Amino acid sequence: MQVRFYHRDEVDAMNVMEGAILPLLAVTGGWPFVLTCGVAVLAGDILRRNNTVKCVFNVSQWLLASSLASLVLHALPVSLSPSPAAAGALVLTVLVMSAVNITALTGALALAAGTRSASKGPAVMGHVVGIAASLTLGVCLTAAYRWTPWSLSIGFLLILAMHFTGRSYAAVRADRVRLEGLQRATHALAASLEPMDAIPVFLAEARIGFEVRDVQLVLFGERGTTVHTCSAPRDGEEAAAYSVVLAPHVLAEALADTLYEPAHLSVAGDSSAIAHELAAIGHQRAIAAPLRSGGDTMGMLLLLDHVGMEGFEAGELPIAAALSRELVGFLQRVELLQAVDDERRKLADILESTSDGILTIAADGTITSWNAGLAAATGYTAEEMVGTRHFGLLRPRDSASRDVLIEHWVDQINSASGLPLELQVVSSAGQTVWLSCSYSRIPAGEDRDDVLVVVARNITQARELERLKDDFVAVVSHELRTPLVPIKGWAQTLLNRGDRLSDDQRRTAVQSILAQAQKLESLVLNILEASRIEAGRADGDGIADVGAIVLRIVEDSLASRPDRVVRLRPPAVPCSVRGSSVWVERAVSNLLANAIKYSPDDEPVDVAISISGEDVLVSVTDRGPGIAEDAQERIFERFERLEETRKQTGTGLGLYITRRLARAMGGDVSVSSVPGAGSTFVMRVPLAPVTSGTGSASGSEMPEQRSKLRPVNVVNLR
Ligand code: ADP
């Protein structure tokens, strides 16, 4: 029978056995008393299934206490007849027994606890209360026995009643502690969706609630078995230890196949494989609760080795079952959240990595999302735009240049004209960007209004190309017709009154027809070459003699433009390149035609061929208007024509083709120019490896031979 002393959260239990056995001491004393005490304590320990060490300790402690008490009582020279001296003697013996018991108990506890310092306050108070209760009980029982012996039975009935009341109270208290702990455990699962936060708290609370030494949560997953363990605080530690490992768990895996409801496991008296595995992990008793979901076992909750003094019998399996259901619910919530999170991340990745611009606008015009594609197209970042109604910053207009108020999409989406499919906006750098847009409206949900999703593709380049192509078609049709007018005119004149014309007039007529025919030919060849290049059908096999080709081009140009001066500096040695003669001819023709076309008639054009390292360089220099630096790369693009030279006819294909051909031969074309002073275009093509007969491959004379025909390097047919 115990006296419990509560102080705040701590409780100390004192039994009043010293008082209960006092009548026996008073009556018998000596060895019968000592023996009775020893046998009674041993019987009690066996009934309570205490372990051997504890039994030996308890029996020894009581043998010592009862022997000393017996010695003290018999050493005192007082009779036990009712008298103050007798009462004093009884009090002294109770105190002796209590002192022995308290010393033995606190000494054993101090040894077991090592450095752990228990709070002294409640312990001392508990001892005082315990001793007082023992004294009162002992003196009263002895007095009652002296007064009339049979009244002792009433006293013992009282003790029994108190014992059972105490047991019931202890059981109720244990249940309450357990339920509170379990409530906290379930709360831990409800309060968090992060397993690494919730599971340690859950296990710690379950351990306290079930008053067990260890709790293990074993989860079977695709990547293996995860074991979360919460163990009782070790020596010198305040808090329970938590650990998680990815490792097989033989006991839990064996139980998973056979156990569908929570069950008690015990090593004692069980020779099954399960009991063997329980012993193998160092435990004697356990409650195993499977985590079942849809006919599958997803894990196991193991409550290992009960350490409480009482309770923990009735109702523990249903509570373990409830806890395992909570765990299953928690794990399913976590899994669901993870799936939602994965899905959300996947969508966010798609949204961010797509090159198309995607934005969403709420019904009130607030921009709610703005992806990286849109940031790249417009130069405005998501941080600048999301949460604002600043779409107007982009000055959106439709293809007829009318302002568009996307923020008011709710009114416009159902109007006759709807929202424009092509939007022109102004980027943060001030450039016009064309967007091809598609719109979809997401109807209002429970917690939000309608949302407009706009998918916008940057079509600026495509639109620009389209515009250039339109220009090109207009220019080409004009260019093809223009030379035909003088050709037809001159041919008509020669036919009708050729015999009446002077020699000079006829020469002028034929030269004009030739010049226009060359222009036409060049135009047609450029268009054909451009389409061959675009179709990837250009064929550059062979060896081209650059000196001979350039000389022929210069001569042909001068034949049609005898009014111009073209100065040619041929190479010092024959130079050939690997590639088609037609390519070299086309490329150089284009450069020379431009130089003649864009420079004043009275300015000469210089053409020079030289060797630099492993390359042949053909440079064409004019004294024309020159090309601004920022346009020097642009002019090599398809259909690109500069505004300042628009009065000259052209298609914008010549330089594009020239560069493509030069690159196809392993070289390139570049320009250096001083606006107002003229330009120099240089084509660089690697030399062909020297082989016998290379120099006359084209069958034409060497440039030197030609230049011998004309003693200076100036070809002037004026
Ligand atoms: P096209 O001459 O038919 O217009 P090109 O591709 O040969 O086409 O030239 C592209 C543009 O580059 C020309 O329209 C002109 O504006 C500029 N350009 C080319 N050569 C010269 C030059 N020698 N001097 C000044 N501008 C030039």
Image (spheres, grey):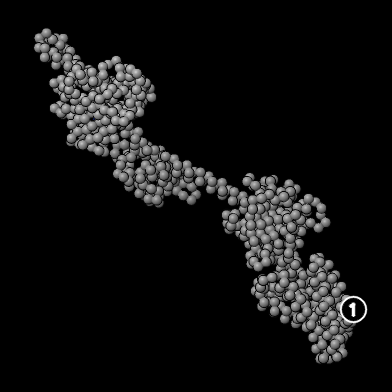
- Helix or strand or loop: what does disc 1 sit on? helix
- State whether residue 185 appears in this view: no
Residue 485 location (% of width, % of height): 19, 18
User: Residue 122's quadrant in the figure?
Assistant: bottom right
Q: Residues within 10 Å of mark 1 (few under 14, many from 20)?
A: few
Question: Which residue is drawn at the image coordinates 31% and 29% (left, top)?
Answer: 615
Q: Quadrant of the N terminus?
A: bottom right
Question: Which residue is drawn at the image coordinates 21% and 31% (left, top)?
Answer: 645
Residue 546 location (% of width, % of height): 28, 23
Q: Quadrant of the C terminus?
A: top left
Taking 215 as reference, is 696 above or below it?
Answer: above
Q: Nearer the viewer, residue 165 or 564?
A: 564
Taking 179 as reference, is 277 above or below it?
Answer: above
Disc 1 marks which amino acid?
A: Pro
User: Residue 25's quadrant in the figure?
Assistant: bottom right
- State whether residue 222 appears in this view: yes
Question: Which residue is drawn at the image coordinates 90% and 78% (left, top)?
Answer: 32
Decide if residue 225 is on the left or right side of residue 688: right
Q: Which residue carries the number 1 mark?
A: 32
Decide if residue 12 is on the left or right side of residue 143: left
User: Residue 160's quadrant in the figure?
Assistant: bottom right
Residue 233 location (% of width, % of height): 66, 64
Residue 249 location (% of width, % of height): 70, 51
